[in-house]
Amino acid sequence: MMATVVIPTLNEEENIAKCLQSIRNQDYKNFEIIVADGGSTDKTVEIASKLADKVLFEAKRTIAAGRQKGADEAKGEVIVFADADAFYPPNWLSSLLRHFDDETVASAHGKIYLAEATFAEKFFHKSANLFFKASNALGHPTGAGANLAVRKTHFHQVLGFDTDLVTGEDVLLQKKLKKKGKIIFSDDSIAFVSARRVRKWGYAKFFLFHVKNWLLLARKKQPMREYEAVR
């Protein structure tokens, strides 16, 4: 099946080349890459134009709006969401997409590792991934948008992302997709994401913020309305 990888960007010139090159190096070959940019003032678009199949512009600067913009233009049967400050092992796409051979699967998400992690950060991300797996098993899928794949037909049936949200849009999407099919946690699908937010916020603030967000969404309430940009 064909896949579309969607990457929202905003002033990511330091990271976007590594991200896109890692995706170009996948062992799965039937895919396109769409970058949806929110109006970068650095060299993000220039770099992305050389490595992506398409670069789109989205005036609404939420990450949800960027993801939605790319998804609306996707040609693939499965839409895979990635982050501009992440990079991906060569088997990332194939490990995610194999789950969609089962027609009852609506979405799949994988592990999040912190890039160049310290010992403490390795413990932190291993604990987070155990939580993702357990939460999914309990019927509360919480896959991160940096490592998330959805069946396109189901994505459009549930009307995609809430583009007003600044965080939690990925979790809310999966909650809607549960009505369409299975949500799979993929143990061997790994994204290496920047640790910049964890390091700027500190472990306590980062942990408490995301726990509060998870509890709000689990209680069918709106997620946090403020999420500062970290570059």
Image: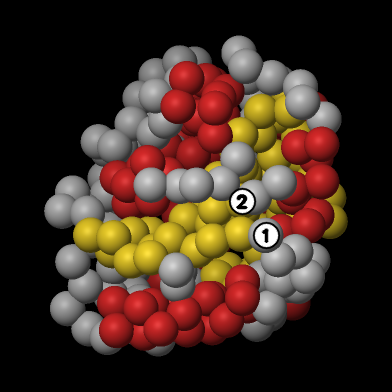
- Mark 2 is surrounded, within 10 Å at the Cα level, by few (under 14), some (14 to 19) or many (20 or more) other residues, namely many
Q: CA distance from mark 1 to mark 2?
A: 7 Å
The image quarter in which residue 123 lies: bottom right
| Whether residue 186 is situated above or below residue 164 in the rendered picture | below
| Whether residue 198 is situated above or below residue 73 in the rendered picture | below
Q: Is residue 34 visible?
A: yes
Marks 1 and 2 close (CB-CB < 8 Å): yes
Say how the picture is coloured.
secondary structure
The residue that appears at 38% across and 47% down in the rendered structure is: 73
Residue at label 2?
3
The residue that appears at 61% across and 71% down in the rendered structure is: 23
Between 169 and 135, the residue placed more toward the observer is 169
Between 204 and 93, the residue placed more toward the observer is 93
**Image coordinates for residue 68, horizontal then vertical, percent:** 36, 42
Mark 1 or mark 2: whose residue is earlier in sequence = 2
The residue that appears at 46% across and 47% down in the rendered structure is: 74
Label 2, secondary structure: give it: strand
Residue at label 1?
30
Screen quadrant of the C terminus: bottom left
**Image coordinates for residue 13, horizontal then vertical, percent:** 35, 83
- Residue type at mark 2 is Ala
Which mark is on residue 182? none
The image quarter in which residue 153 lies: top right
- Residue type at mark 1 is Asn
**Image coordinates for residue 58, horizontal then vertical, percent:** 22, 54
Q: Is residue 202 visible?
A: no
**Image coordinates for residue 184, horizontal then vertical, percent:** 76, 35
- Mark 1 is surrounded, within 10 Å at the Cα level, by few (under 14), some (14 to 19) or many (20 or more) other residues, namely few
Left or right of residue 79: residue 205: left
Left or right of residue 178: residue 172: left
